[in-house]
Image (cartoon, rainbow, N blue to C red):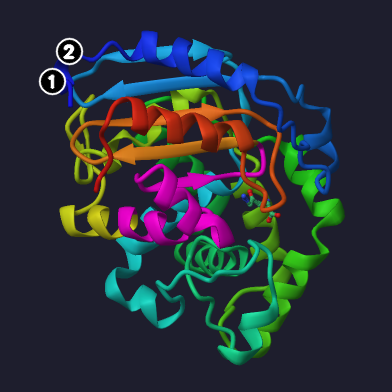
Amino acid sequence: MQNKESINFNSIFSKIYCELEKTDDPGEVASYIPELKNVDPDKFGIHLITLDGRHFSFGNSDEKFSIQSIAKVLALVLAYKLEDEKLWERVGVEPSGTPFNSLVQLEYDKGIPRNPLINAGALVLSDILVSHFDDPKNQFIEFVRKVSGIPEIDYSSRIADSEKSTGFTNAALVNLMKSFGNIRNEVDVVLDFYFNLCSIEMTCAELSKTFLFLADYGVCPFNNEKIISTSKSKRINAIMQLCGFYDEAGEFSFKVGLPGKSGVGGGIIAIHPNRYSIAVWSPRLNKKGNSIRGMKFLELFTTETEASIF
Ligand code: DON
């Protein structure tokens, strides 16, 4: 293994990009949310930030995209901070092995989602945040701005409205959980919060900065602000490792070896604890809803740098 401080990530990015250009596995952009269809499928961006403040970027790293399910991790951070261990009475920590929007386990499990990163789990997080705040959407985005140190981060009403127009499966999930008593607020209020959560837009540079505190045991290294305890930060990374890619979590762990989270906008965030956070964006998805080139890039990246958490 190279001395980690001497690695030139930029040359590794270019080398891997050339490799990816030779592969032919195009995939499709997400189309079930109408607005996501309008994204150029060939965009490709990377941004890596080390804990000592070095930045490395490649391609379309400064273009905003819809972070979608990646935002579920930020909802988890805030809900865990507010609820402490009580949170686990309403949502589990087990990999689901099912698609992100699956309904099938919820009935057997009496309305308790397997983990916070599948849609059912993130809907419970949304319900919890709606219960805690007077002005949930504003208070949540203020939290994201604080964690990222970027006051301009915002929701996209265009994406949120588009998802609302086709969000029937999410409506079914909330209703089923409400029937079991695991949703305390009005269904429409919870769904509105959730669709906005998924609509947040960031660039790769912003995304990697936002998640850097999870590489630093809960502290934002750029301003030393403690966002969450060391123990909670470690556990959130554990949940990403096991559940961040739905029924492809094993594949990501096997090939990449870092905790991470994907979104159907084509973004992936991955964390190397004590070293860096890296965001990758490539909108073409595989059948499981994960970015094909994003996953392949990270596999080649941890192979080339000979460093993962294992
Ligand atoms: O609930 C949905 O369908 C989306 N807003 C979020 C899905 C998502 O990003 C799943 N990720 N891979």
Is 43 rendered above or below residue 165? above
Q: Position of residue 251 (x, y in %)?
A: 49, 53
Left or right: residue 213 versus residue 186 is: left
Q: Position of residue 224 (x, y in %)?
A: 17, 32
Residue 147 falls in which quadrant of the image? top left
Q: Is residue 61 visible?
A: no
Placement of the N terminus among the 4 image quadrants: top left
Q: Foreground residue, 309 or 223?
A: 309
| Secondary structure beneath label 1 | loop
Q: Are marks 1 and 2 in contact (CB under 8 Å)?
A: yes
Q: Is residue 3 above or below residue 239?
A: above
Left/right placement of residue 156 relative to residue 31 reads left
Q: Residue at x 73, y 38 (%)?
A: 157
Residue type at mark 1: give it.
Asn
Whether residue 251 appears in magenta in the rendering, the answer is yes
Answer with the quarter of the image where residue 282 lies: top right
Mark 2 crowd level (few <14, some 14–19, many ≥20, 10 Å Cα): few
Q: Is residue 165 left or right of residue 143?
A: right
The residue singled out by tag 1 in the image is: 3
| Measured Cα–Cα span from mark 1 to mark 2 | 6 Å
Residue at 76 percent across and 69 percent down: it is 171
Which residue, given by chain and number where applicable, does mark 2 sit on? 6
Dot 2 falls on a residue whose secondary structure is helix
Residue 72 percent location from the top left of the image = 51, 53
**Residue 156 in picture, x, y percent from top left:** 68, 35
Regarding residue 52, the answer to whether it shows in the image is yes
Respond yes or no on whether mark 1 lies under 8 Å from ligand 1. no
Name the residue at 55% across, 56% down.
248
Residue 13 located within the stretch drawn in magenta: no
Residue range (magenta): 237-265
